Amino acid sequence: MRVSVFVPQYGTIEGITPAFRTFQTANEFLTVFGKKPIFEVEYVGLREYVPANNGEYTIRTNRLLQDVSKTDLLIIPPLFGDVDSGLLANAEAIPHFQKLHGQGTSLASLCVGAFLLAETGLLNGKKCSTHWAYINEFKERYPQVEVEDGAVITAHDNIYSSGGASSLWNLILYLLEKYSDRETAVMIAKYFALDIGRDSQSQFAIFRGQRSHADTDIQRVQDYIEKNYEDKITVEDLANVINLGRRTFERRFKDATNNTPIEYIQRVRIEAAKKYFEASRKNVSEVMYDVGYTDTKAFRDIFKKITGLTPIEYRNKFAKIVNEV
């Protein structure tokens, strides 16, 4: 089986090398256990020598992308820096991705490599993952693609994508298991000290308020929520801030932020709770009250829905000092 790792212009060495190293190392393990290597692994690119990390590294490709007439799996690593510049620099790769996919090649994007994959149009009407910090930009640029917010891996037909940063390892391990076996994938996970079972990047996400819109009235409401989240806030209260009827307000708020007002309040409160857990000695009940909740079950359920962890699990994972068992 041939695995081709695309080396993008404006790429990162940290995003490009993991897939190559994983499949090569799998071959080495297979050999040690008396089995035949099953992967032919190569770097492909638009140029023979491709700079990475703004020129800090240079990667030599094995073949030019234009010369690849057949491969089984094409992996598209993340871009580095400005997305617009990265897409422009790699524009000539898009027709080759489309052609290879049309010939049966599986495509897999890692992290913000999803932007390059989406440029092909092959994700239209499908779901995908990308780095949590780029989800809003991705949705605005590719409205025909459904982003699975928080997902580490998406797999639809023979198109795959991963969430942000280290989530790319989860997709690489998934593909390794798919094309070899579970034993090999577990062995590689242990060798690289990776968590093979993680299925959400929500615990790492930071809610930034979704303010990349031009509705100044809704921005006023966002300011109000972020200053008063610990108080009891109703939708009617928020509509009154800008003198709108409830239905009109709810429609405008959802159009601007991609959240309902209630969802937005919840996310602001949970983001505040996360910061308390990370930086203070407060227990779960104290934090719950500080961010505006009085019902322990409701707080726990909403916290887990947004972060993928219970409040105690989150605090134990990220707090500087843990006192409570």
Image: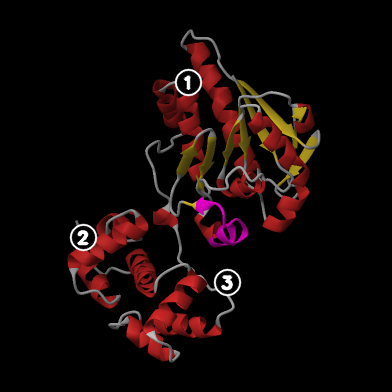
Residue type for callout 3: Ser
Q: Is residue 271 magenta?
A: no
Q: Quadrant of the N terminus?
A: top right
- Residues under labels 1 and 2: Cα distance? 43 Å
Depth check: 177 or 316 in front?
Answer: 177
Identify which residue is drawn at 51% across, 43% down.
162
Q: Which residues are magenta?
A: 136-146
Identify which residue is drawn at 53% across, 10% down.
36
Estimate how packed mark 2 is, as few (under 14), some (14 to 19) or many (20 or more) residues with alpha carbons within 10 Å: few
Classify mark 2: helix, strand or loop.
Answer: loop
Residue type for callout 2: Glu
Identify which residue is drawn at 62% across, 28% down.
105
Q: Earlier in the sequence, mark 1 or mark 2?
A: 1
Identify the residue position indicated by label 3 in the image. Answer: 212
- Relative placement, left or right, of 105 versus 58 is left
- Residue 272 screen position, x and y as percent: 37, 71
The quadrant where residue 307 appears: bottom left
Asked if one can make out residue 58 in the rendered structure from this viewpoint, the answer is no
Identify the residue position indicated by label 1 in the image. Answer: 180
